[in-house]
Image (cartoon, grey):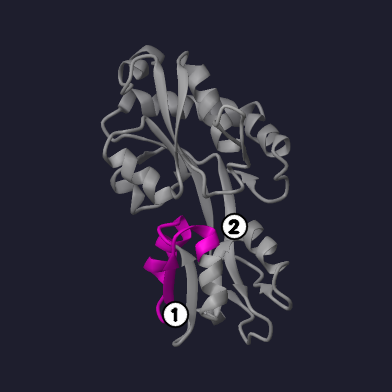
Amino acid sequence: MIDAACAELLSPGSLRVGINKGNILLVTGEADNGDPEGIAPDMGRALAEHLGVEVYYQCFSSPGEVADAAERQEIDVGLIAEEPKRAEVISFCDPYLEIEATYLVPAGSPLRTIDDVDAPGIRIAVSERAAYDLYLSRTLQHATLHRARGLPGAFRLFIDEKLDALAGLVPALEENAESIIGARVIPGRYTAVQQAIGTLHDRPAMKAAVQAFLRKTKSIGFVAELIDKHGVTGKLQVAK
């Protein structure tokens, strides 16, 4: 299986790993040589070791850009959230992590529950092409989405335009709430974002090798160890 997977690599002997640096839970820093550090880069490096090849990181500022690179066949694998729209260009393997998503609302907001947010006239700031943007685009019936590039951009839009809510991952929203007097994170979730490794559609051996790698890493507790190693315990969970 591994030999067949390696034969499908874009560059012999090197695994091109697409990394979304915009996810601050999965990319928590940068090494002296410029390589990204965090759970996602460590998963990419471990996968390369599993295949017996070198790892080469290609970093992007958003998950949408990782998906675009996969569509252009510039990466072998991408570590981003699984989502139906992205599955049109990426063949996702089983998720290895999940992160809950909800809303942040400003002081004095009458919005109390997840359902309250989806109402006529409600304006929601969201990071463009994030997994929860794609999810909300499919499911919202009444509220409108206002997009900005990346989490910082969405937060700035929420503040500057005095929008009704900010959509995002629970840990990031909790940090945002600390900088706004009276802001609240609405309890519950509208979805749980599944973080996965995706391969190119025409690489069946690579997908099989990644699936085997994921089964092994979860069974031996490697993913849980990475959560502790990078200081994000309690902010995300190992996927079932």
Write the residue at 64% across / 49% down: 236
**What residue does disc 2 label?**
100
- Point out the image quarter for the N terminus: top left
Q: Circle 2: is it few (<14), some (14-19), or many (20+) Cα within 10 Å? A: some
Q: Position of residue 186 (x, y in %)?
A: 64, 72
Residue 221 in the image: above or below residue 13: below
Residue 70, numbered label: none
Q: Position of residue 45 (x, y in %)?
A: 53, 25
Above or below, comparing residue 147 to residue 165 in the picture: above
Residue 116, by quadrant, is: bottom right
Would you say residue 48 sits in the magenta stretch?
Answer: no
Q: Residue at x 38, y 47 (%)?
A: 65
Q: Secondary structure at mark 1?
A: loop
Can residue 134 be found in the magenta stretch?
A: yes
**Amino acid type of the residue tagged 2 in the rendering:** Glu
The location of residue 158, given as percent across then percent down, is 54, 74
- What residue sits right under mark 1 in the picture? 143
Residue in the picture at 34% in, 23% down? 205
Q: Nearer the viewer, residue 184 or 224?
A: 184
- Residue name at image x 36 percent, y 16 percent: 6
Q: How many marks?
A: 2
Q: Is residue 180 above or below residue 79?
A: below
The amino acid type found where label 1 is placed reads Ala
Place residue 145 in its image quadrant.
bottom left
Q: Position of residue 230 (x, y in %)?
A: 69, 38
Real-space Cα separation, disc 1 to disc 2, in angstroms: 20 Å
Q: Nearer the viewer, residue 17 or 218?
A: 17
Q: Which label's residue is closer to the chain start, 1 or 2?
A: 2
The magenta-colored residue range is 128-153
45 left or right of 172?
A: left
Secondary structure of the residue carrying numbered label 2:
strand
Crowding near pointer 1: few (<14 within 10 Å), some, many (20+)?
A: some
